[in-house]
Amino acid sequence: MDFKKTGNRLSVTLLGDFNLNIVRRIKNLLEDKDELYIDLERARFVNSEAIIFLHKQIHNNRTIRLKNPPKIFYEALKILGLHNDWNLKTIIER
């Protein structure tokens, strides 16, 4: 995982899957940042812990932007019933 802190933003580029270990690392880096940008282009998998983490961040009024999430991300959102709760047009970047 690579990261960069700029002002109120934490930008993360994942080098692999988005899982519990990555969630823990991001939590440690996030501190009081208001924006979280995650590049998921290299991730093949996003597990439920990662989605729950993102959901909590959204509900804590943190701005979340995700670049190129894998197909499984959308399937997991649907299974968890969050696909209608998240405004994907403002969250997802291609």
Image: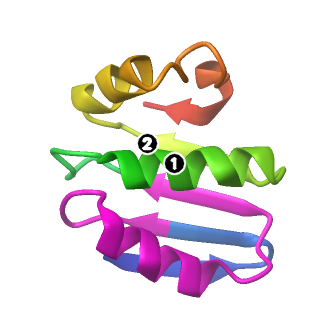
Give the quarter of the image for residue 74: top left
Q: Secondary structure at mark 1?
A: helix
Q: Which mark is residue 52?
A: 1
Q: Is residue 42 above or below residue 89?
A: below
> Is there a contact, CB below 8 Å, between mark 2 and mark 1?
no
Q: Is residue 65 magenta?
A: no
Residue to which mark 2 is pinned: 67
Quadrant occupied by the N terminus: bottom left
N-terminal of the two: label 2 or label 1?
A: 1
| Relative depth, front residue between 2 and 45 | 45
21 relative to 65 in the view: left or right: left
Measuring 84% from the left and 50% from the top, which residue is drawn there?
A: 61
| Relative depth, front residue between 47 and 45 | 47
The span shown in magenta is 12-39
Q: Nearer the viewer, mark 2 or mark 1?
A: 1
67 relative to 73 in the view: left or right: right
Q: Secondary structure at mark 2?
A: strand
Measuring 29% from the left and 61% from the top, which residue is drawn there?
A: 19
Label 2 to label 1, Cα distance in Å? 18 Å
| Relative depth, front residue between 86 and 66 | 86
Q: Is residue 20 above or below residue 81?
A: below
| Amino acid type of the residue tagged 2 in the rendering | Lys
Give the quarter of the image for residue 72: top left
Give the quarter of the image for residue 94: top left
Q: Is residue 23 magenta?
A: yes
Tell me how many marks there are. Answer: 2
Most distant residue in the front direction: 80
Task: Give x and y (percent) for residue 3.
Answer: 46, 78
